């Protein structure tokens, strides 16, 4: 299809919702809703206290607004800042912000459209290994409070889970958000 019209309905620092006019073959659809949303990263992070041969992973146990108080397992996630930040840099920044961990081995697991009909940005999942607790230096100083994704509002509890526990968790739908389950499942395939 081809976008032949674009009217902004609402915009915030988080997203822009627009009504597109779309031409599909010989038909025009006047009310195609489209959401421009920041690209995001998700990272499955190896526990610094585990070994390469017997890895454990740092998993968040949390609630989120759209989960209606349901508790979910989660991986580190966040927004790729709109000022030109690249996904690998966002992943490293978010891992440090949420866990105070730096990692030496990064495996990109792809780039996926969140919603093929409505936009919603792209998700960039990663697997991070060979990690340690320590200092983070991005070369530009710490992100400011003005950054879009600077702070999470929900409480997060960090727990270490073995590879088999993480696999059981993803198989039993304990990572309720689709981006988290996608990241974990892709990482599990990579680790096999």
Image: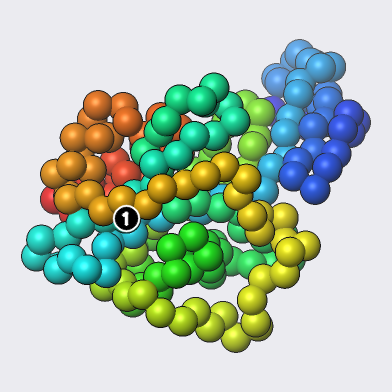
Q: List x then y, in percent, for residue 132.
A: 32, 75
Q: List x then y, in percent, for residue 176.
A: 41, 29
Residue found 59% across the figure and 30% down from its top: 65
> 180 or 20, which is in the foreground?
180
Q: Secondary structure at mark 1?
A: strand
Residue found 64% across the figure and 55% down from its top: 151
* Count of all numbered marks drawn on residues in the image: 1
Q: Of all residues shown, which one is farthest toward the bottom?
A: 139
Q: Residues within 10 Å of mark 1 (few under 14, many from 20)?
A: many
| Mark 1 lies on residue | 58
Height in image: 183 above or below 32?
Answer: below
Residue 17 visible at all: yes
**Left or right: 48 with respect to 142?**
left
**Left or right: 128 with respect to 152?**
left
Specify the color scheme. Answer: rainbow
Quadrant of residue 15 in the image? Answer: top right
Residue found 72% across the figure and 34% down from its top: 35
Height in image: 56 above or below 156?
Answer: below
């Amino acid at each position: 299809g081809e976008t032949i019209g674009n009217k902004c309905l609402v915009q915030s620092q988080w997203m822009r919702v627009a009504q597109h006019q779309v031409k599909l073959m010989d038909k025009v659809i006047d009310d195609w809703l489209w959401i421009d949303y920041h690209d995001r990263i998700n990272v499955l992070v190896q526990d610094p206290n585990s070994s390469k041969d017997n890895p454990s992973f740092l998993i968040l146990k949390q609630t989120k607004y759209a989960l209606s108080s349901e508790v979910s397992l989660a991986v580190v996630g966040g927004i790729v800042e709109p000022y030109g930040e690249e996904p690998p840099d966002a992943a490293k920044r978010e891992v440090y912000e949420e866990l105070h961990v730096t990692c030496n081995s990064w495996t990109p697991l792809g780039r996926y459209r969140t919603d093929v009909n409505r936009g919603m940005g792209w998700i960039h999942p990663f697997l991070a290994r060979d990690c340690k607790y320590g200092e983070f230096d991005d070369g530009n100083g710490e992100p400011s409070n003005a950054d879009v994704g600077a702070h999470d509002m929900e409480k997060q509890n960090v727990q270490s889970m073995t590879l088999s526990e993480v696999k059981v968790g993803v198989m039993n739908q304990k990572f309720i958000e689709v981006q988290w389950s996608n990241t974990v499942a892709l990482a599990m395939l990579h680790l096999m």
